[in-house]
Amino acid sequence: MEQGGFEAYDNGTDLRQADGDARWYGVTDGNSAWTRAAVTTERAHTGTKSLRLLSMYNTSYRRFSGLKKNTQYRISFYYNLGVYTETNNNYLYSVAVVPGSDEVAYNGNITSRFLACRILDAETGGCTADNEWKRFEMIFFTGDNTEVQLCLRYIALASAGIGLYID
């Protein structure tokens, strides 16, 4: 998969409205206005822009199509959630790759279909400083699939406007 940087987009671009594989979704929200997936200059790991995700159940996903069957792929990205403390319980909770193009359900019915999944905890998924960007990397095998979904779930107080930044 090619570099997924956000420098080519204008600041404020809503990637919930993007075409094709560039589009981000929130789980089981019917693409409601509550879900956010906006390019921003607020924080960036490299360059000047990143993607800020804020969604129902703190879970967002993106589809990838045109993959080769029976092929190994690597997903990697940097993320930032602000500093983890006992009162700011912010951290990346899970990253999963699931086959197909169906809407991702929050209820966990897809767990038996994971092509790859990693669960993190506050120590492994949390940032220790506001400006810290952590790198995440995972390898998955497509099997008979040519389309997959990358699902990101994070722990944060969404009502306080805390979102997941990725770059």
Image (tube, grey):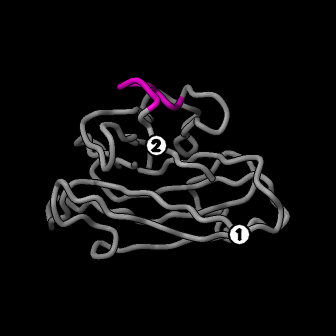
Q: Main secondary structure of the magenta part?
A: loop
| Image height of 55 relative to 116, above or below | above
Give the structural element (helix, strand or loop) at label 1: strand
The total number of labels drawn is 2
Q: Which image quadrant is residue 115 in? A: bottom right
Q: Amino acid at mark 2?
A: Gly
Q: Is residue 31 above or below residue 47?
A: above
Residue at image point 67% right, 68% down: 114
Residues rendered magenta in the picture: 8-16
Sequence-wise, the earlier of marks 2 and 1 is 2
- Viewer-nearest residue: 129 or 96: 129
Residue at 33% across, 41% down: 47
How dense is the environment of label 1, judged by Cα within 10 Å: few (below 14), some, or many (20 and up)?
A: few
Q: Quadrant of residue 19?
A: top right
- Of residue 144 and residue 30, the one placed in the foreground of this image is 144
Can residue 63 be spotted in the picture?
Answer: yes
- Could you tell me if the residues under marks 2 and 1 are in contact, i.e. CB atoms within 8 Å? no
Q: Position of residue 136 (x, y in %)?
A: 43, 65
Callout 2 environment at 10 Å: few (<14), some (14 to 19), or many (20+)? Answer: some
Q: Which residue is mark 2?
A: 5
- What separation in Å lies between label 2 and label 1 (alpha carbons)? 21 Å
Classify mark 2: helix, strand or loop: loop
Q: Is residue 69 above or below residue 27?
A: below
Q: Which residue is mark 1?
A: 72
Res 36 visible: no
